[in-house]
Image (cartoon, rainbow, N blue to C red):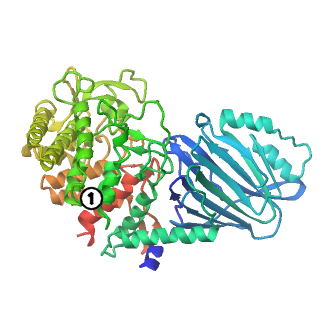
Amino acid sequence: MRKKLQEILRCDDQNAMIHDCVVSHDPAPGAWSHHSAPQSPLGTVGFPEMIGSDVLSVVQGLVYTAGADGQVIEHALTEHQWLPWSYSGRGAQIHVERTVARDVWFGRVRLIKRQPAFLLLELHSTPSLGVQLERHSDHLSFAWGKQFEIELSFSPCPVWMCLSDDPGPLKRKFAGFDDVKLNDAHCNWAWKNTGKLWLAVAFRWSVEVRFQVRRLRRPKTRPLSFAMAKRNEEKRWTDFLERQVPRLTTDNPVLRDTYYFGWQSLWSNRCDIGAGQLRRPFTSPSRLSYGAQWWYDEPFNAVVYSHLKDPWTAYACFENFWPCQKPDGSIPGCVRMLITDQPAMSMQPPVIGLMLQLLKERPGWPKNLCPMYEALLGLARWHLSPRRDTDQDGLAEYHHCFDGPADQSQRWDSQKLDPAKVIDAIRPTESVDMNVWMSLLWQVLGEMANRLGHTRAAAQHDQIARHTMELVEKHMWDERDGFYYDIDGRTHEKIRVKTPYGLMPLLSPLVRPERAERIVAQVFDPKVFWCKYPLPSVSLDCPTFNPVDMFRGPTWVNQNWLVIVGLQRQGYHRQAARLARKTIELVGPRYRGGHRIRSPRFWEWYHPHTGEALGNPQYTWSAGLAVDLILRFFANGWK
């Protein structure tokens, strides 16, 4: 099995390696710019903290040798081979190897011809994090607060090592020009104010680079060698895939590749930081870009973890949130390594109710149910408090684009306080998704209360669940269009924008069957949602549909998955399998003539007509939910 896994996972078109604090990859085009990022022999390696906030990153690691007459020659790689625990790249004049272990990354550079060379590393840090730089003869160290130290070291000891805020003087120094002046005080100023420097490291013909994050409050461990790190990481991955992941019986290459690459992407993003608000293991949406843990994302991951041979991993995902709950019952939209007074991301969709219904089936309720019940009851009451249900009509509201699951969707265009802004506060908006999920959450609370012996509370929770769905049916259903629309929280006027979130009533056992039938028809209508790679994040006939602009047209795997689960719940099993297959084909590999020409792509969002992968790569719910769909529908093949 081990050899077969290596054959499946070996590829030449992606190379992310992640283990806790340290991440490494050759970056894809920008999530919003769609513009190519710098590529280099050492790739990008870093310690991310939050979206757009890095403790430290090496944005690129370039390799140069000297040519004639003061020329400096840059070298590139033309061949690549990747496994989850190692990378090998070759060019005409250089060979590069990379590997990771927990909190450490290694890069080896060797020239084919023995000659002097130098590395040019572009260093970035977010100035507001206050990362302190200290120089040494063979390494740089960076201190972040009292919890972390990052060491960037080189072996053997460099011939020389210099810093500058401009790569030009460093190249001239290597080329032998004697007019180069470098000022340490200026570099200190540049680092403090811009968080950007260039580091030149001269070496003879080979060098090993180590990027290591150390937790200052933990005992120091013996340094790993490159070979030992690689062996440890290979063992970590093969043990996980052989001992924890359910065996797939089908030999269909699309399903097989999608399944194992999916587990690899999901488990890569599972981290054990042990700092700040992230005291317990968590799963980042995309560790390459999002360093924190998200309240909306984590329940999706929990459902996938329930398939593991140790399914109780699923409940561990939530343990960082309960200590962060505010006295009013609200839970931060994300928790992070830093503990600050700054407002947290407000993303609050209570999709956890649906996920707990699924987790109740496997692995069952946790033994210590009471803390979760109390926390979720406080959250549910907060959603219906005067602050979040301003008209006190029993329908919870979104108050900011960031509150919901689709922040710059056309759903909010008419609701924004400042229409010129992409993201802004909105007028109180009672949305379909929010209130269907609230109804499911109240159902779960009722089941929990019964299990805990609180029968009166259970009856009250069940009543709120039913009443919430009655309000959804009364105020959000449009008989003419046969669709559920969000409504303005004050006027109750419908916001006539069709998105997959208007399909969320399919998840409820209380939806009216005749209405479910009408919205299911729109899922498969080529004028509304059905296209080559459904479901677009807004209907195809929307005047502002844009197939590449995040929530304004692209397809999202988690939206598809929610609709698929809803179709199953309403008895539309054939239709659910049809959409599930489309989703797997979207993220899965491409084969031609029996050969794989592209490995699976677990990106944040996708072009609904071409299937182009967009947004951030190595995205957990795209990977994990593809795994879940395979286990639900296709474990034995496409039947």
Q: Amino acid at mark 1?
A: Ala
Residue 124 percent coordinates (x, y): 64, 43
Residue 600 percent coordinates (x, y): 42, 62
436 or 475: which is nearer to us? 436
Give the number of callouts.
1
- The reply, left or right, for residue 64 in relation to residue 364 is right
Q: Secondary structure at mark 1?
A: helix
Residue drawn at (67%, 32%) of the image: 193
Residue drawn at (31%, 56%) of the image: 314
Residue drawn at (8%, 39%) of the image: 456
* Quadrant containing the C terminus in the rendered view: bottom left
Which image quadrant for residue 261?
A: bottom left
334 or 572: which is nearer to us? 334
Residue 59 percent coordinates (x, y): 63, 49
Which residue is identified by label 1?
Answer: 580
Residue farthest to the right, as pictured: 178
Q: Is residue 1 above or below residue 32?
A: below
- The reply, left or right, for residue 25 in relation to residue 324 is right
Q: Is residue 583 visible to the viewer in this orientation of the structure?
A: no
* Quadrant containing the N terminus in the rendered view: bottom left
